[in-house]
Amino acid sequence: MLLKNNNNDERCAIAVHSPPPPPPPTTAAAGIYIHIPFCIRKCPYCDFYSISDLSFKKRFVTDLIKELEMRADPALIVDTIYFGGGTPSLLTSGELEKIVAAVTKSFKFPNKRQDLQITMEVNPGSVKESYFKEIREYGVNRLSVGVQSFQNRKLSFLERIHSADASRQTILSARDAGFDDIGIDLMYGLPEETEKIWLADLEAALECHPEHISCYMLSYESDTPMFAAYKRGDIKPLDDGKAASLFKLTSEYLVSKGFSHYEISNFAATLEHQSIHNKKYWEMVTYLGFGPSAHSYYFQLLSDNALFKRSWNTKSVHKYLSLIENGILPVAEQETLTNEQQLIEMIMVSLRTDKGIDIKSFEQLYGECQFEIIFKDVINQLEKRSWGKIEGERCRLTNDGWLFLDTILRWFVNKMLK
């Protein structure tokens, strides 16, 4: 779709730089993220905060509950709890029960239990069927199983502590315990990985009949052992062309099997099986993070202004415990987002999803200007390259566009900052 020349271009350029009206607070229910910072062994590619000293776990659970009590807001409606890590399945079922009870005491929840989604990340081989039955009784109704691969050679490269058979048994045990919402995490783009190797993982995943599949490209994050190995030349990453082919294969194959590709790395068997919690991140809905390194995004009402804020907890378990035990919230930093930051984030997270940018919402935040006038050149480039297009009141990227997401984001941001 080519946009016609419009004499309002200059007027809009001026309006872009004038302060837009304050955004209205969202009415959607909030989410709770709880970071469990313990692992049996740290994976060499992972840059999420965790430690392997489990001797602090009991003390951590006690202080986590204190943090929940300190930040309690009985008026805040919450419909998701997500246990991430680290390895949340290292919690005993009794510890999990205490934490869930503290969360439900500190916030307001839906009247119907089935409207509350509680997700737990689980590492294969770390739990038994009896554990699944117990945590299900305490409210966990969705699992995210960190399989990463159904091939032992890949698991060895990733230094995972489980086997492919352990993954299958874990999923089977969860099914036998009554779980009917199971997600599988897979990783691809390893050195020398071929379409044949990756397709074997996707086929093995579907044999487990998951309701959700997350497929993450291996990345070399700074301050990780795998990044150090890459810098030394011990690892040669897969080249960009082959990685792009694997991304396209993933989408085409899973969509052909009935899954919806609803976010750049996520696939759901049905609309009901999308991750309600993770969608809060992409839709800029309030979420509160508890535990070391956990992030929060929320708003505060001051007079007629809605101020959107972000904060994050200290990373160190030791500092976290010390602060809590001295009656101090473990916040490392916090910031109030400018209108410009909010708009940039809206573009960034929206383009990751199949829904794309809600043009009307953007225009409400931006003022009087029309989206298609402000970003005329960007839209033309997207359509010319088949990277994206305007559909109704949405600006969406294609699969090819998702491959160049960082480049596209720079285009949008550069237009906004002119």
Image (cartoon, rainbow, N blue to C red):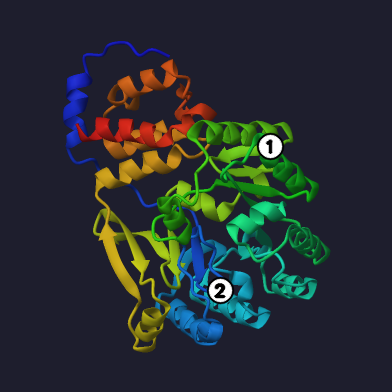
Q: Which of marks 2 and 1 precedes in the sequence? A: 2
Q: Is residue 74 above or below residue 146?
A: below
Q: Identify which amino acid the numbered label 1 is placed on.
A: Leu
Q: Nearer the viewer, mark 1 or mark 2?
A: 1
Task: Please give left or right for residue 30 compared with residue 200 in the image.
Answer: left
Query: In terms of depth relative to the viewer, which is nearer, 207 or 120?
Result: 207
* Residue nearest the viewer, comparing 223 with 50: 223
Quadrant location of residue 124? Answer: bottom right
Q: Residues within 10 Å of mark 1 (few under 14, many from 20)?
A: some
In the figure, 344 relative to 112: above or below? Answer: above
Secondary structure beneath disc 2? Answer: helix
Query: Residue shown at 73%/50% (left/top)?
Result: 210
Q: Residue at x 83, y 64 (%)?
A: 176
Q: Residues within 10 Å of mark 2 (few under 14, many from 20)?
A: some
Position of residue 340 in the picture relative to residue 176 (left or right): left
Is residue 44 shown above or below 278? below
Q: Is residue 292 visible?
A: yes
Q: Is residue 244 left or right of residue 376?
A: right
Residue 143, position in %: x, y?
A: 67, 60
Residue 194 % position (x, y)? 64, 37
One can see residue 148 in this view: no
Which residue is label 1 attached to? 254
Q: Which residue is mark 2?
A: 104
Q: Position of residue 306 (x, y in %)?
A: 29, 54
Whole-percent x and y of residue 363?
Answer: 33, 33
Q: Residue at x 63, y 43 (%)?
A: 267
